[in-house]
Image (cartoon, rainbow, N blue to C red):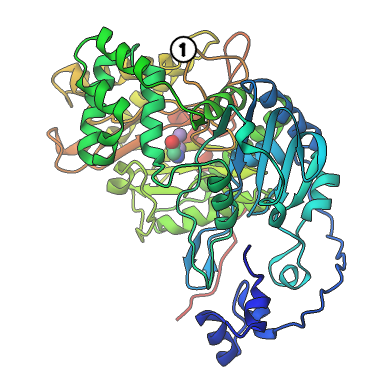
Amino acid sequence: MRFPFYAQAVLGLPTRRAAYVLLSGCLSLGALPVAAQAPTSIPEPIVEYPAPARPTDFLTPAFHKQRRELLRAQLPPHSVAVVFAAPVRNRANDVDFVYHQNPDFHYLTGYEEPDAVLLLFAEPRTVGGRPDVTEALFTQPRNPAREQWTGRRLGAAGAKNQLAVQYAADDTDFAASGLKWADFDKVLFDNLPTDTRDDARNPADLHNLVATFRQQASVPADYNPAVSEWEAGIRRFGLTRSKGFAEYLTSQIKENPALGNSPLIRDYVAATTDAARKAAIDAHPPGRLDDATLGEKLDGLRAVKTPEELALLRRAVRISAQAQREVLKLMRPDMGEMEVQGLHEYVYRRYGAEFQGYPSIVGGGANGCILHYETNDRQRLDNDLVLMDCGAEYHGYSADVTRTAPPSGTFSPAQRQIYELVLAAQEAGFAACKPGAPFDAPNKATQEVVAAGLQKLGIIKKKEDFRKYYPHGASHYLGLDVHDRGSYGPLQAGNVITVEPGIYIPAGSPCDPKWWNIGVRIEDDALITATGYENLSAEAPRTVADIEKLMAEPSALENFKLPELK
Ligand code: GLY
Ligand code: MN
Ligand code: MN
């Protein structure tokens, strides 16, 4: 297994970065200064540093345990489900990106640290000499020296006690767990990290766990997740939507020729009739290693929110709506996109939201026509419409709320016409939010309104051309991921989806220049209920009249003035 970092220093093998720290004496972030101090080989006693009070509204161990049990009950006989924590990602040199747990791992455990793996067994197994184990969590070990620099760790005992996991052990014990992998008929996994760096000087956190799993479960060296994702797609959708599916797959093989090496993919795209496609699918059944089924089960579970999840998601959405309100009151033509972004994110933190669910999108005029614009560096908004697609992440749950408004507080006639068309489309989308409706129903409803409206305004000649100005779908699931897991089958009570039509008319578009550089999206987060829907982001105004009224009100941050830096 990997040498602890201080051991490398003791053995006289400091990394390039550690050497730099030793020479410079700087307080570098992360692991390196621990090496610089080269502690003795006597293990340090574990001293507990009690944490000051934290929020108390996290999901409970009972919630996570119930999720594990629901998933376990759906596993095929004689199978194991394997879920890895998210890898640590390096930002530059010795600075990593802020760690964010794999949402599946969070959902199933509540464990927030890297370098861990969860195993769920369809039937009880013997692990680490202990019989009758149904769930096993291997976590990064306690390490006092590291914890002083990078934070508290739960360790195996903490995971067992605080997360109520039946069996927990250090990840260094994973290779010698004694688990008989050959006894499993199916090994289920999803999104297996395939890029965990194996650098003897500085191995990626997850490298050893993934390497051990690959070796013990006999994952082939040339395992390619893109290939198996397409193979799973063929088995799932390859006969119901065969023509479009085969055409799209053929175009993908041109971009990623490795796909063509799969016998199933090759035979499927070569087939010209559904009978031949079915024969191809039957000839290549899934193997023992299965990276499709686990994802499908998690799609089903995560798409229907429990009351505990809804409490957190509602809070994320309400925080985001309050941020939109405050920014609408404060926005002025002399502000820049970045300041507007900062105001949203400041409000999030004031309410205790730890992150943004995705990079905040604040685009004025032409920038608002770029769907996932995130540079946010226009310096003056002037009076171009500003599209603000921003969502707080609260205890893991992400909102996704967009408002579009003129910095002066008053829409121009052209801005208003496009805005009101998008709003009408959104209302049609909401009206289609009903349990039992196809997932695509709200999208289709918005498309019809946008197409008819653009034609009426003379922006397009034929209705079919609406896609040029409305190129995305209206809905996705929302939850632990902003584009959350879900089956994309009929809507169900407990789903939370976005309703987000938009119209984007970049300069140079083939229409009257008065429309140019208008980009409008209105995005709300809808809970599907037993009878229809509830708009969770309704606190942020949507109509022109309500937005203009709110923008005329003073903001709580009105006097938040900082000195000029000359
Ligand atoms: N904010 C990304 C999206 O609306 O889907
Ligand atoms: Mn969205
Ligand atoms: Mn959005």
Q: Is residue 114 left or right of residue 148?
A: left
Residue found 62% across the figure and 37% down from its top: 181
Using the rendered image of the protein, determine whether residue 106 is visible from the camera's viewpoint.
yes
Q: Position of residue 178 (x, y in %)?
A: 71, 45
Q: Is residue 283 above or below residue 105?
A: above
Q: Position of residue 1 (x, y in %)?
A: 63, 62
Residue occupied by mark 1: 432
Residue found 58% across the figure and 33% down from its top: 479
Quick one: 3 or 542, which is closer to the camera? 3
The image quadrant that residue 534 belongs to is: top right
| Some atom of ligand 2 lies within 8 Å of the CB belonging to the residue at label 1 | no
The image quadrant that residue 439 belongs to is: top left
User: What number of labels is visible?
Assistant: 1
Q: Position of residue 528 (x, y in %)?
A: 58, 17
Using the rendered image of the protein, determine whether residue 315 is visible from the camera's viewpoint.
no
Q: Is residue 48 above or below residue 540?
A: below
Q: Position of residue 488 (x, y in %)?
A: 47, 20
Q: Quadrant of the C terminus?
A: bottom left
* Displayed-image quarter of ligand 1: top left
Residue found 51% across the figure and 43% down from its top: 192
- Secondary structure of the residue carrying tag 1 is loop
Quick one: 527 or 476, which is closer to the camera? 476
Quick one: 349 or 539, which is closer to the camera? 349
Q: Amino acid at mark 1?
A: Ala
Q: Is residue 153 left or right of residue 375?
A: right
Quick one: 475 or 263, which is closer to the camera? 263
Mark 1, residues whose alpha carbon is within 10 Å: few (<14), some, or many (≥20)?
A: many
